[in-house]
């Protein structure tokens, strides 16, 4: 006898004006199953699950819960029906502790709850299971992005959800954190929870999916059991053609000239300090910066970009010291900057796509909207490529592509790229890398911050290692570097121990 579906989508569509985000979708979710939903950015994956979570009502079709038409009219209804969702954009309060954030979202929290009260220890049970390294008394503002993601997941698990929806959860996790999450997902699925895993990473599918639903242009084009399709077939179904990742970093100039120079940078922020960081990047060179999340990468990027002040040291680009800039001067510099969280730090969501692409022009004193807007939207595959559309309507991946279009769309003296492919699909990743390497080939100095060690090894000329706010090593990428060697440097492990 076939098990009964917990949730069922029947011919569900969702329109936003003329845009059909979800088109006639049919899908069943079963108890104890992990369902991976794959697709390009803008394929409709997140929108489909937001219909189940009550963020939007369906335009057509219906959703059944336990065989009955859903009465969910909003997220509060969804949570009371045992449906929880972890979004790409977190809803944590940075000034509060981890425990306080969990208490705020916990249905059982009594009005007299306090930090000293031991009767609320139950709220920390899932945190202890999922992320025992996170101190519940730490302020959320001091956590890495990956750690904040884990706290968000604990919030959902604390409502005793029967259906847990994870929207690109591994895009901000280190490989070790992702492996731990995969194991935890298998654990809660074994306890009877239905898990929906929205992702573009095939490694997520291989690690923990039971069923794979593939979306393209708003439609579910295929649903299969794990192992029924090869990875090549899955990629073809996602993209409509067989897309392969290739890396083509530019050749180094025969006589490289130093262009970007960090000179003994020191800076302080809550929970992190930078200590005498010195690093140079030559014209045409791609230097990768690798480290375990939370070791100073974000603070260093904000210092270079002029967002966070230094206590001492210099950031020199083409002989000009950039450390004492106001915000408009920062925008007008020839430094292209893709921050770690583009939605929060790189776009104005109430502005149109055209206006966001023209922010640098405005900072330089211009008033005209970039005349090449349409060409840029098309070139970077921003979907939908409508220049008068508000940025707030784009998916996270398409916002990432919008920021990349602005920062890579014109020649730059230097590029600071922080996790530039986070949350992107295979095709978009390829585009971003081609554009980043093209900037280097044209003479830009590229500093590329990433936790994807395979990509850094494939595409960087040198790789610097940051640990506890210090650059502890800079290695020439001569073919001898491996994930294990870089991981040992990132964690402080003795390389002799690794060999042994």
Image: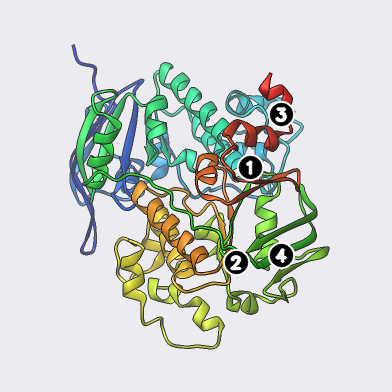
Image coords of residue 485 (percent x, y): 64, 33
Closer-to-camera residue (89/476): 476
Residue occupied by mark 4: 261
Q: Mark 3 or mark 1, which is nearer the start of the sequence?
A: 1
Q: Mark 4 or mark 3, which is nearer the start of the sequence?
A: 4
Image coords of residue 4 (percent x, y): 23, 20
Q: Mark 2 or mark 4, which is nearer the start of the sequence?
A: 4
Residue occupied by mark 2: 283
Q: Secondary structure at mark 4?
A: strand
Nearer the observer: mark 4 or 2; the answer is 2
Closer-to-camera residue (7/90): 90
Inter-mark Cα distance, 1 to 4: 23 Å
Count of numbered circles on the image:
4
Image coords of residue 18 (percent x, y): 20, 64
Closer-to-camera residue (436/366): 436
Residue occupied by mark 3: 495
- Residue 371 in sight: yes
């Amino acid at each position: 006898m076939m098990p009964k579906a917990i949730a069922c989508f029947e011919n569900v569509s969702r329109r936003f004006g003329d845009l059909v985000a979800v088109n006639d979708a049919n899908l069943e979710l079963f108890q104890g199953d992990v369902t991976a939903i794959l697709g390009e950015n803008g394929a409709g994956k997140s929108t489909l699950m937001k219909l189940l979570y009550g963020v939007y009502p369906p335009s057509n079709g219906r959703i059944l819960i336990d065989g009955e038409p859903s009465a969910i009219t909003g997220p509060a209804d969804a949570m009371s029906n045992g449906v929880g969702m972890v979004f790409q954009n977190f809803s944590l309060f940075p000034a509060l502790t981890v425990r306080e954030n969990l208490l705020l979202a916990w249905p059982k929290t009594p009005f007299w709850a306090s930090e000293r009260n031991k009767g609320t220890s139950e709220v920390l049970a899932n945190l202890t299971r999922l992320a025992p390294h996170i101190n519940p008394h730490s302020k959320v503002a001091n956590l890495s992005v990956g750690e904040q993601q884990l706290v968000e997941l604990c919030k959902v698990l604390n409502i005793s959800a029967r259906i847990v929806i994870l929207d690109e959860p591994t895009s901000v996790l280190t490989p070790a954190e992702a492996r731990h999450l995969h194991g935890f997902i298998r654990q809660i699925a074994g306890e009877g929870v239905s898990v929906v895993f929205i992702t573009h990473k095939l490694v997520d599918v291989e690690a923990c999916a039971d069923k794979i639903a593939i979306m393209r242009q708003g439609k579910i084009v295929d649903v299969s059991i794990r192992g029924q399709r090869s990875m090549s077939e899955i990629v073809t179904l996602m993209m409509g053609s067989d897309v392969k990742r290739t890396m083509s970093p530019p050749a180094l100039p025969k006589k490289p000239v130093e262009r970007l120079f960090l000179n003994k940078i020191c800076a302080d922020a809550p929970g992190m300090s930078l200590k005498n960081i010195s690093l140079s990047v030559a014209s045409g060179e791609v230097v990768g910066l690798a480290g375990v999340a939370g070791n100073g990468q974000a603070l260093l990027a904000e210092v270079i970009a002029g967002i966070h002040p230094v206590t001492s040291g210099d950031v020199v680009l083409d002989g000009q010291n950039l450390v004492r800039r106001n915000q408009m001067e920062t925008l007008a510099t020839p430094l292209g900057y893709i921050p770690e969280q583009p939605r929060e730090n790189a776009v104005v969501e109430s502005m149109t796509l055209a206006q966001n692409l023209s922010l640098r022009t405005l900072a330089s004193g211009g008033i005209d909207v970039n005349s090449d807007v349409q060409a840029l939207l098309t070139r970077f595959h921003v979907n939908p490529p409508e220049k008068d559309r508000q940025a707030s309507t784009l998916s996270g991946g398409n916002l990432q592509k919008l920021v990349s279009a602005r920062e890579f769309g014109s020649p730059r003296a230097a590029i600071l790229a922080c996790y530039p492919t986070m949350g992107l699909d295979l095709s978009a990743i390829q585009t971003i890398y081609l554009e980043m390497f093209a900037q280097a080939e044209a003479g830009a100095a590229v500093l590329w911050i990433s936790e994807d060690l395979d990509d850094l090894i494939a595409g960087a000329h040198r790789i610097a290692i940051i640990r506890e706010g210090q650059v502890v090593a800079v290695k020439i990428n001569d073919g001898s570097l491996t994930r294990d060697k870089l991981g040992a440097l990132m964690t402080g492990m003795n390389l002799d121990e690794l060999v042994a």
